[in-house]
Image (tube, rainbow, N blue to C red):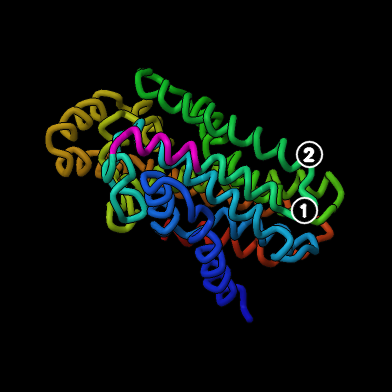
Amino acid sequence: MSIADIIPAYRDEINKGLSNIYPYGPDSLTKPVAYVLQGGGKRLRPLLTIFSAEACGGIKKDVFSAALAVEVLHNFTLVHDDIMDQDSIRHGQHTVHHKWDDGVAILTGDAMLSLALGLLNQTPAVSHLQMKIFIDGLLAVCEGQALDKEFETQSSVSLDEYIQMIDLKTGHLIGLAAELGAISTGVESHICEKVRDYGRLVGRAFQIQDDYLEIFSNSSNMGKSLESDIVLGKKTFLMIKALEKNSGVIIKALEIARVDFEKGIGIIRDYLENEGIKNSAQKEIDEILKLADEKLNDLPIDKEKLLYFSKLIKKRGN
């Protein structure tokens, strides 16, 4: 079976595993948790955990609970992010705080964090190191989100500051997914670190790509509301470059977008394309994914699925 055929089968298993992780409890908690986990998504993080384990000689069964834990942790962060950004759509359906209310959404996220830790604890021979990596990853995501919120009110953010933020908010969690898979097999620490670094770079590319798609794609393609990030003044790779080049044009376009989103985003798209910033972002994504693949060079592992994963991420933006 080809890797392209394996992925849908693995996704089905992941979705099935997520469908019944919290069957008993108050309806006001079990229902929104089930709602979030059945909302869809490409399940890229748990796929990466499994692929990393298999690359290092492990088997899916031994890392499956850890893979589910990573996905639940990821979705926990999204539930709380959506409250902070007041987003209304996620994975093609209403966000929890929009469908219920903020209180339900906060409790749902809190419960999902507990469920994620419980799933990790179910992993065969779970180690103290795996738990530490998971907990450190949780704090890193929170720190990245804190910086993201701080940047909204800063008039100027450098590309280095932005990279630091996305490495925490997105890169760390995807690196965690890869590292947990490698560690579960008992391979040497330097191999685990290289696989982790591969994941972190993939995460960096993924976030820049996400920023790109939020401007040049649409809500139906992305499965989430896009207006809030633009209107809130989120600092992204493209917007930082645009503000450095001509802050006046961008600030005026953002003001228009707050009143007439389609008109404002049209001005921003045209500017990014005409000034070569759109093309620069595409090249940056490709370069980071190339660096990620190079992390796997010379490692005595079966790299095929991981290299395919990089292509999967790249294809997402095309």
Asked if residue 109 lies in the magenta stretch, the reply is yes
Question: Which badge, 1 or 2, is on the more N-terminal residue?
Answer: 2
Q: Residues within 10 Å of mark 2 (few under 14, many from 20)?
A: few
Of marks 1 and 2, the one in the foreground: 2
The image position of residue 243, as x and y in percent, is 34, 27
Q: What element carries label 1?
A: loop
The residue positioned 57% from the left and 35% from the top of the image is: 167
Q: Magenta segment, which residues?
A: 101-111
Q: What element carries label 2?
A: helix
Q: Residue furthest right?
A: 188
Q: Image quadrant of residue 267?
A: top left
User: Residue pushed farthest bottom?
Assistant: 1
Identify the residue at image location x=63%, y=46%: 118
Q: Where is residue 74 in the image (x, y as percent from the top left)?
A: 51, 45
Residue name at image x 31 percent, y 39 percent: 97
* CA gap, disc 1 and disc 2: 12 Å
Give the labeled residue for mark 2.
128
Residue in the foreground of this view, choosing between 11 and 289: 11
Amino acid identity at mark 1: Ser
Task: Identify residue for label 1.
Answer: 184
Q: Which of 305 and 115 is in front in this view?
A: 115
Q: Nearer the viewer, residue 256 or 187?
A: 187
How far from the left and from the top, in percent, is residue 306? 66, 60
